[in-house]
Image: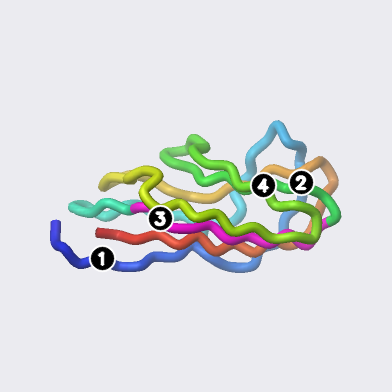
Amino acid sequence: MSDASTPRFLQGRFPFEGVGFDALSVIDDSLSLTVPAGSTIQAVYFRGGNSSDELITVALMHDGKPVRYFSIGARAGTHVALRLVEDFREGAELGLAITAPEGASGTVIIDLGLVEF
């Protein structure tokens, strides 16, 4: 493993429709990443925005299981610093999913900053 690091981002603007807080739904396939061989990735920050009138939650998924939850208030945003929370090793599958009240709809803005080293 080299001493160099490379920033990675999972980001974008995505429509959503809530199916209930008991169900996690993949937001978009573009919000996924497989940690390359010989690398480790750390999440550095999460920023999110929610255009709906309801509280929503975005989950950071690791190998299909939620490891961090980020609640975003109605018509609000959030910023969470994540430095040194955990390492994701080579081969790990990372992604983002959403949970929202049934019938809630809107747009979620996602910006997950990662560093690969």
Q: Secondary structure at mark 3?
A: strand
Instruction: Say which residue label 1 marks.
Output: 5
C-alpha gap between disc 1 and disc 4: 29 Å
Amino acid at the residue labelled 3: Leu
Q: Residues within 10 Å of mark 4 (few under 14, many from 20)?
A: some
Give the prevailing secondary structure in the magenta stretch.
strand
Question: Do tag 3 and tag 4 residues touch (Cβ < 8 Å)?
Answer: no
From the viewer's perspective, is the residue at label 3 or at label 4 nearer? Answer: 4
Q: Quadrant of the C terminus?
A: bottom left
Place of residue 74 in the rendered image (x, y in percent of width and height, measured from the top left)? 80, 54
| Residue ID at (45%, 65%) | 9
C-alpha gap between disc 4 and disc 2: 14 Å
Residue farthest to the left?
2
Q: Quadrant of the N terminus?
A: bottom left
> Disc number at residue 71?
4
Q: Secondary structure at mark 4?
A: strand
Instruction: Say which residue label 2 marks.
Output: 18
Amino acid at the residue labelled 2: Gly
From the viewer's perspective, is the residue at label 4 or at label 2 nearer? Answer: 4
Judge by depth and name the residue closer to the eye, 54 or 36. 54
Question: Do tag 1 and tag 4 residues touch (Cβ < 8 Å)?
Answer: no
N-terminal label among 2 and 3: 2
Position of residue 86 in the picture relative to residue 68 (left or right): left
Position of residue 57 in the picture relative to residue 52 (left or right): left
Instruction: Say which residue label 3 marks.
Output: 33
Q: Is residue 21 above or below residue 97?
A: above
The stretch in magenta equals 42-52
